[in-house]
Every structure is written in C-alpha cells, then in structure tokens.
Image (cartoon, rainbow, N blue to C red):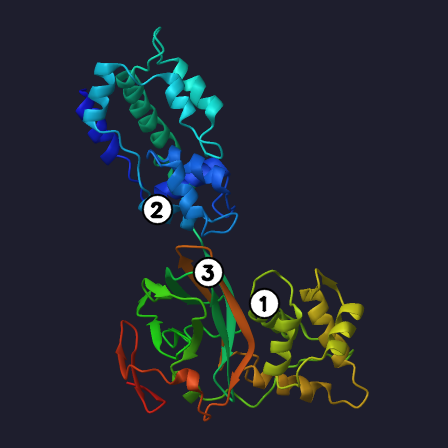
Amino acid sequence: MSQEEILEEDHDSYFMSNREFRNLYRTIVGDTKTQVNIRQAYTILNCSGRNIASAHLNNQWQYLQEKIAVDRLYDIYIKAEEVIITKDEVEKAMRTKTMKADDILNSVKEGSLVNKQYLEYILQEFTNDDGCVDIGALLEATNKSKRDIVKQLSGPRVEEDEEFVLKVRGCMTVDPIVKCISYTVDVDNPTFCEFSLSLAENSDVPTDRFKNDLFLVVYNQDRELVGLTRSASNGVYKTGMMTVNPGDEVMVIGIGTTIKRKRSTTERLTLIEENNKLSRRFRATLMNIFESFDVDQDQILNKQEMNFYTVASGDSELTDQDWDVYLSGFDNRDGGLTMGGFIKIHEMEAIDPEGNASADLWHSLHCLGYDNQLSSIFGCSYDIEGLPCRPSRLTPDLPYLNHLAAHNPNFNLTPPHFYFDYFDLLIAEKIYILL
C-alpha cells in the first residue's frame, strides 16, 4: 500500500454511525449513561479512528460542563477538526529526516490532553539511530492499529445493541364518567419513538370487549397533534415512528362504541358472605383492579396510584392521614400497599355495623365500569410500550378525570379527520364521531 493510499484510507474510512459510536463508548466506559470528563472524551475520540486535535477539544470544552453525555460527545466527534498529515508533508519528512522524536515530544504543550510519556513510549519503536522518526512505518502501523481498534470496539455485537423500552399500565372507564390517565414524556432532548397500545390481561373484561375500541394520542404542549395509533395487528395498535419532545403528552381515549352497550341483568353477585368475608369472585375482581391501577407494574400501589383508585371509584381524594393509616395498618413494602394489604382494606370495609358495606362497594364497582355480574363492560386496563432512541420516561398524571359532556382543551386536536387501519375518526368542533 502506497503512502497516498494509507493517507486516503486513514482520512475517509473511519466515520462511525451513532450506534457504532455508542458501542465504542459503552465498551470503554461500561455503559452509555455515565458521563465523561475531557480526558476520557479524548481517549474515546482517538479510539474512534480519527486524529482529533487536543487544542480543538480544549476549545470545545470551554463551553461545556465538567462532564458530558455520549450524545454530546458524538456531536463533537461529527464536527471535530481532524489532524491530517498530507502526502507532501510525509514525503518531505521521509526525504529530509528532520522529524526527530525529541522535537515531536517537545511540541506537546503543558496542559495538553496527549500523554507525553505514552507518546514517548510509542515513538521509541519507530525512531532510528540518528533520532529521526520513520514516518512511513509509523503511519502504516497507526492505520492498521486504527482498523483493529475500531473493529474490536464498535464491530457488530448484536447481543449488546442498546435498546430503551418504556412500559406503563393504565386503565380507563367510559361510563358513567370518562376516566383516563395522562402521561408526560420525560426526555432531555427530542427523540424518535414508536408507541404501541394493547389491552392488558384482565379476566373481568369480556372477550372481544374494547377490541379496536381504543386509540393512543400524542400531543404537544401547544395541544397540537403529534401522533396516533394507526395500525392494528394481533391486538397491538402502533403509532409508527415519530419525533417526541420533552413535555409531550400521551393519552388513551375510547372511540365510543362501548358506551352504547347494554347493562347486564339487575341480579347482583354476592360480594360479602354471611360471615363478613369477601366472596371468592369479588376477591378475584379486587386482584384485577389492583393490577389495573399499578401503573409502574412494581406489584405495589404507591400513594399516587392508590389516590387515583380512590377517586376513580367515586370517593374523595386520599389525604396524608388516610395514607398513613393504610401504611400503619395494612401490609406494605417500599412505601406502597401490597395486593394483600389492598384486599385487606376491603375486608375491613365489609365489616359495617350499619349494613351499608355492600351498597358502598357496588357504588365503587359501578364507577369503575363493572356491571352487577362483576363483568367490566365499561372499563378496561391497557399497556403502553414505547421504543425511544434515547433514555425516556412516561410520568403519569393521576388522576386525570373528565366528565363525558365537559369540554377538555386536551381533546381540541387540529386535524379534522383520521382514517387508519382499524378506525375512522372524525373530529368536528370538539365532538368525536365514530364513522
């Protein structure tokens, strides 16, 4: 390989994609969440296969904080001023033999990011008896080393590809009052993301209820539409890739077909047995309700989640005193109620000397969308999964309740008509019509 070919390959072949750069970063640092200082950044940049000038990085760093994240370092990598030794400079150095090792070492200024001792160690292998550096051999070895390092650090390792996944549980009721949850996108910078929506497993929801009946909407802080679930496949509804920004909101809305379904028989199942114990069927329902309100799926209900359940079931908001009573009197862990504690609360409510326990429990169940046979015909739970390109969270706003007839500015979406795989939606003056 000629010197010109070495130089051209060295300059043009080592431009890394974002994924390759993140692989290299993770290999050196350990993960892509840890931020790096300027010396660590310099090491990573030089391992990327580019000759990054120490002075250039120093100039960039004066506008940055002490440590930076992987995305910011990749921006520096993309825009970096690479040190390029031209063919003429190489030929001149090889012809005149004027590039001495001492001159190269003395050119390293105080405060430089270059490790002078390490540089001296490297140059020893390519220094002739007269003290001059064999530039041709040095460049060829450097070029080969770059190829090996980049291949080793950023080469295809499918098992280590980084993925960010968001998962939250939600629930909603469409009758007698519309109740739903709003989620805020918590991300540092705009990112590509696809959301998928699916019904959660719930034995109280009849088969095929709410099928093709819900859709997920994403809107920004100006209440402008960002995206909707557009396609349906095997019970999963997807938005497709979109750009989401910090502060964007996500909401799941019912199209409306479930509102017209007839109520079941007026004959009620037994909730409380003669010995003041909860019936087996009602206990199973409480277990499903618990899982529906466990938004973060950590197997406990925190205060926010328990408050949403309390309000959604027709009661007043949970006070700090109420919450303290729950934690002091019922099974809990990590500051939240366990499923056992949640059921025990209802067992205590069943012991009512005045005999109103059953009526109160049925009122709560009807508010949650249950009929008299403990079938959830007006309420359901769902799972939202997001696949963003960078670390993100969905922060729930609980409770988020809306009366069916009340105007909510969040629903004032600009586009008037949407036609997608599984529904055709017309929005006319804040009124939703299913076609």
Q: Residue at x 73, y 76 (%)?
A: 320
- Tell me if mark 1 has few (under 14), some (14-19) or many (20+) residues whose alpha carbon lies within 10 angstroms of its own: many
- Tell me if mark 2 has few (under 14), some (14-19) or many (20+) residues whose alpha carbon lies within 10 angstroms of its own: some
Q: Nearer the viewer, residue 177 or 284?
A: 177
In the rendered image of this protein, does residue 347 appear above or below residue 16?
A: below
Say whether residue 92 is left or right of residue 211. left
Residue that mark 2 sits on = 18
Task: State how many labels appear.
Answer: 3
Amino acid type, mark 3? Asp
Chain-order first, disc 2 or disc 1:
2
Where does residue 210 sit, x and y in percent of width and height? 42, 76
Q: Quadrant of the N terminus?
A: top left
Amino acid type, mark 2? Asn
Chain-order first, disc 3 or disc 1:
3
Residue that mark 1 sits on = 294
- Can the viewer see residue 162 in this picture? no
Residue that mark 3 sits on = 188
As helix, strand or loop, the secondary structure at mark 3 comes to: loop
In the rendered image of this protein, does residue 316 appear above or below residue 163?
A: below
Between the C-alphas of marks 2 and 3, the distance is 17 Å
Between the C-alphas of marks 2 and 1, the distance is 36 Å
Q: Nearer the viewer, residue 190 or 206?
A: 190
- Can the viewer see residue 401 in this picture? yes
